[in-house]
Amino acid sequence: MKFKVFVSILLFSVLIQPISATNILLRNGETIKGKVVSQDDLTIQIVPEGGSPKYLKKSEVLKVVYKEVSEIELKNIRLEEEKKIRSANKQSPSK
C-alpha cells in the first residue's frame, strides 16, 4: 500500500512540473534560458531565468532545446537549424 502511495505521489509531482527547457533559440539570433510552461499552435509561454512569464510567437522561435547542452553544442544546433531553413527555402517554388 505504501508503495502505491509513493508511486502515485511521484507520478503526480512529475506530471505537474512545467515542461523544462534549457534554451529557447530565437530566429533573431538570441537565446533565452528558462522553462517552457505551456504552448499551443501559435505561441509558447516561457519563464526566463530570473524573469517573469512571457509569450513568444512560434514563428519567432528557431528551436527549443529540452536538455542541458554546452555553448558549443548550442551553437552547432543553431547552425543546423538555420541550414535546414535555408535548404527548405531553396526547395520551395517561387511565387
Image (cartoon, rainbow, N blue to C red):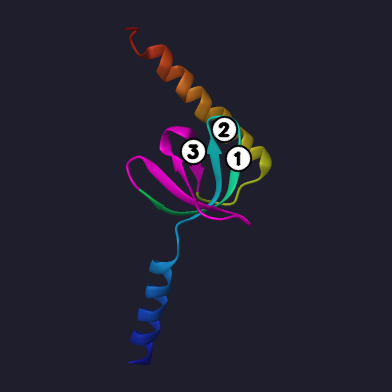
Which amino acid type is shown beneath numbered disc 1? Thr
- 3 and 2 marks in contact (CB < 8 Å): yes
Q: Amino acid at mark 3?
A: Lys
Question: Which mark sits nearer the N-terminus, 3 or 2?
Answer: 3
Residue located at (40% from left, 84% from top): 6
Q: In terms of depth relative to the viewer, which is nearer, 50 or 34? A: 50
The reply to whether the C-beta atoms of the residues labelled 2 and 1 are less than 8 Å apart is yes
Label 3: which residue? 63
Q: Residues within 10 Å of mark 2 (few under 14, many from 20)?
A: some
**Inter-mark Cα distance, 1 to 3:** 10 Å
Query: Does residue 68 sit above or below 14 in this rendering?
Result: above
In the foreground, 11 or 57: 57
Q: Secondary structure at mark 1?
A: strand
In this orientation, which residue lies closer to the viewer: 29 or 55?
A: 55
- For the point 61% across and 47% down, the residue is 69
Up/down of 9 relative to 90, above or below: below
Q: Does the magenta segment cover residue 52?
A: yes
Say what amino acid the circle numbered 2 marks.
Arg
